[in-house]
Image (tube, rainbow, N blue to C red):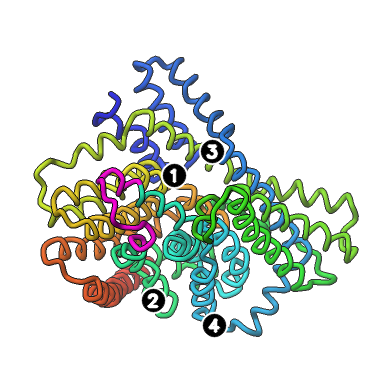
Amino acid sequence: MVGTFWSVLPPLVAIVLSFVTKNVILSLFLGILTGGLLLNNFNPFSAVVYSLEKIAGSVADEWNAKLLLFNLIMGAGIAFIWRLGGSKALADWARTKIKTKRSATVWAWLLGVIVFFNDYVNAAIVGNVTRDIFEEHKISREKLSYILDSTSAPVATFFISDWIAYQLGMIQKGMESANIKDISPLPAFFGSIPFNLYCLFTVVFVGIIAFTFWDFGPMLKAEFRAQREGKTKRDGALPLLDVGFELGKPIEKRPMIITFVLPILALIGVTIWGFYYTGAKAGGDTLIEKLGNADAATALLWGAFAMMFTGIVLALGFKLMDISETFKTVVDGFKLMLLACTILVLAWSIGSVTKDVDLSGFVVSSIKEGTSFALVPGIIFVVGALISFATGTSWGTMAILTPIAIPIAYKLTGDAWLSVTVMSGAVFAGSIFGDHCSPISDTTVLSSIFASCDHMDHVNTQLPYAVFTALIAFLMYIIYGFFKISPLVLIPIGLVLVVVLARILHLNSLKKLSQDFRVQR
């Protein structure tokens, strides 16, 4: 059953049940168990043992363990910001500076573009800075989680970040597989950016939504609920991070914005230094080489610890807490992240299961020989999306697909530059699109965490938006495949379609919502 159609079952069970039951933990575990049954001849005892070993292995993995600790310590940092009155002080400041709903959403979008050096840090920083501002202006948690998710990986994939270092390595592997020796990975990466169409369209689309509020589908309903009823989250929703509920009221006697700013600056500064330090220690002359060798998980962990330690110093230094209250806040912050950490562990575990059943091998083998190059960019984009959606990992998908896609294109065209740039862009775009849609993706989970949003509410509202920009990107890949039109022409065409179709979908959704509202009344 390994590498066959049956390989689809474990992620399919987890994803379908996530949407049906709204219980992500149960759904993920049943997906893992399904893989255990397939790999152990449907022996239930062996399947349970296998499942538990996979979960334990996910926790024991050094990278995963550091990210779990990062989340727990980040929770403590968030707890200090809340209890010391930093969030209240920021909200008070926001009332004087950010006076409209539009300025709040545009601010979140711009901040998401500015914080480009790591997708995890992007979600953490932008979420912490804007969460209370969005609450103040009655903007739905779903909207914030969408902005976080769609300005993290899509932005990190373009600018100087650990993502670029990883992508350079994937391009190098693809060229080695195709025996292409006369192109350097760095120029090839820059050449791939115009073909990373999903990410380009998504980042622009987030800005359009932030400026215009042309929401449609489930997101429009969420925004309608927040504005009309004042409910930023759905009745019965289970946010992955509910600071106010878990930590109670903040200290109001002396709210200072410094208790928000300093922990965030500590997080940013130490994390950036950690990227540079670990990369330089591992070796490398240029900044890109150092980023390629950086230990991102360690840098994130150091940054989160600096954030928490700054909170401790502020609490004791300003005598806002005694030692007992201070370390109770640390423990309470850890508790904030327990649900989120549970989901992350299970998401990583099912990703490992999909590797054991060789899902990627089955998907890639489904591409038939003799396919015309005209269809190849679009097919690679779709295959990347399917693998990423099912496994919940964009990096893993890039590792699987880049060394396959570049040789396929080179064999069909004989054009080295076209094969490397177009295929790399299509792989990166498809990988990130599938990752965005997947409820088992760690970045999707983290966006739910730092937006304080119910995870499946985030997935359900983001999915139509991700599919919308992906369909336009797919159309542009097909047009390029047939006509070889320059991306300098393709991208503007795609952006015009984004604007026009978003407006049409918004008006249609608004009309339907108004009709439904009148019927309910």
**Which amino acid type corresponds to the residue marked 1 in the rendered image?**
Ile
> Which residue is rendered at x = 30% and y = 55% of the image?
424
Q: What element does badge 2 sit on?
A: helix
Residue 395 in picture, x, y percent from top left:
42, 48
**Camera-side mark, 1 or 4:** 1
Q: Nearer the viewer, residue 336 or 498?
A: 498
Whether residue 418 sits left or right of residue 464 in the image: it is left
Give the main secondary structure of the magenta stretch: helix
Mark seen at residue 100:
4
Per the image, label 4 sits on a secondary structure element best described as loop
Q: Give coordinates of residue 308: x percent, y percent.
A: 74, 55
| Numbered circle sitting on residue 208 | 2
Q: In x, y percent, where is residue 130?
A: 59, 69
Q: Is residue 521 above or below residue 9?
A: below
**Seen in the image, is 482 located left or right of residue 318?**
left
Question: Quick one: quadrant of the N terminus?
Answer: top left
Is residue 417 depicted above or below 178 in this figure? below
Query: Pointer 4 and pointer 2: residues touching (CB < 8 Å)?
Result: no
Q: Earlier in the sequence, mark 3 or mark 2?
A: 2
Q: CA distance from mark 3 to mark 1?
A: 10 Å
Q: Earlier in the sequence, mark 4 or mark 3?
A: 4
| Residue at 26% across, 72% down | 491
Q: Which residue in the structure is indicated by mark 3?
A: 345
Q: Amino acid at mark 4?
A: Thr
Q: Earlier in the sequence, mark 4 or mark 2?
A: 4
Mark 1 sits on what residue?
440
Q: Over which residues does the magenta segment extend?
A: 173-189
- Cα distance, mark 4 to mark 3? 39 Å
